[in-house]
Image: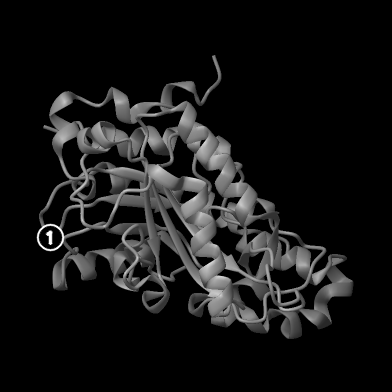
Amino acid sequence: MDKFDTMTDWMSQLPQMLTTVPLWNLAIPGSHDSMTYCLDASGELEPNSSPELDGLKTLETLLQPIMPQINKDINDVIKSWVTTQDLTIVQQLHAGIRYFDMRVACKPDEEDGSRPLYFAKMLYTTAEVEETFRQMSKWLAEHPKEVVIISCKNFDGMNSDDHQGFITQLMDIFSNKLCPNTETPTLQDCWDKNYQVILSYADEEQAANQEFLWPWPETNYWAANQFTADGVLEYLKKRFQTEGRNAGFFATGLNLTPDEQYVLEHPYSSLHKMASSAYPQLMQWATKQQPGAGRTCINIIAADFVDPYFTQLVININRKE
């Protein structure tokens, strides 16, 4: 048996009482920066990456003097510090991941018109957006009781025409699988109506009046931007204490973000090594959490380098008495 098989259809195997609970009151495993497993170190750097990467944007200049000493290309060093996943999108689906954090971008040297879109995190992916989402749609057709939450955001280099073309493409790819934003979705409702995709779009202007695009403000994803487990957990503790979670979909990010100084001091290391050292402490925190509507309850837990162990741990939170 493949190590992913037991996680492939976990939603259909939940206790019946959980199938009538709103999806935002369940514990759902997610992947942070879901597409970074296929970043292309041979390509150009993304010119306008996201705010939490501000410190790393200067790496190209700062690393230049030490590159001959470490015998590595700058892009390879950057890739090792921004890669957050090592499973493909289909492997993540098989492993039980149901929330996907998708940073969509357009390369600056592409001509206007029907420009191909990629995913990006300082570097662009080798995989194009359209093909990736078609793979997801095909997988969902083969697993009709599984529901995914897809968060599209960042949109670096995209103009209004790119947005409209992308939205049209999404409607075509997912079609009647899309759950309208007027629903309070439960698994049972989704099964009854054949909904399998909650599609969020972080650009409010472009998503306005789009029935099948869910709003996803920054407050829906709590990202600590810390490079230690202690820093991440202290950030989450303070936010739960002072404001609590929102009433809809809500993601807690158990992901680390190195700053430029840390990378310069550890040019031979990687985010994978950093995440591995923090993993036990972060997972211990996760096991103590409770899903539900309360202000300190969790919903989506998104992590780096997800695997079936992580997925099983999050799913089991739903079975707490």
Q: Of 186 and 276, which appears nearest the observer? A: 186
Q: How is the image coloured?
A: one colour
Where disc 1 sits, the SS reads loop
Residue at x-position 71% and y-position 78%: 108
282 up-or-down from 243: above or below: above
Q: Name the side, left or right, on which 84 lies relative to 140.
A: right
| Residue 20 in the image: above or below residue 125 | above
- Confirm whether residue 201 shows in the render: yes
Count of numbered badges drawn on the protein: 1
Q: Position of residue 91 (x, y in %)?
A: 56, 35
Q: Residue at x 19, y 32 (%)?
A: 19
Instruction: Tell me which residue sits at (81%, 77%) in the image.
Output: 66
In-front residue for pair 46/3: 46
What's the residue type where badge 1 is placed? Arg
Q: Quadrant of residue 169?
A: bottom right
Q: In this view, does 49 lie above or below 191?
A: below
The one of 123 and 112 positioned closer to us in this rendering: 112
Question: From where the camera sits, is residue 95 visible?
Answer: no
Task: Residue 202: give x, y in percent of width and height.
Answer: 40, 70
Q: Residue shown at 10%/55% (left/top)?
A: 294
Q: Which of 15 and 140 is in front in this view?
A: 140
Q: Mark 1 points at which residue?
A: 295
Q: Residue furthest top?
A: 1
Taking the image as shown, residue 182 lies to the left or right of residue 178, namely left
Where does residue 234 sit, x and y in percent of width and height? 29, 66
For label 1, count other residues whose C-alpha is less than 10 Å away and answer few (under 14), some (14-19) or many (20+): some
- Please identify the quarter of the rendering in which residue 314 is found: top left
Q: In which quadrant will I find the C terminus?
A: top left
The answer to whether residue 276 is left or right of residue 145 is right
Q: Where is residue 123 in the image (x, y as percent from the top left)?
A: 69, 67
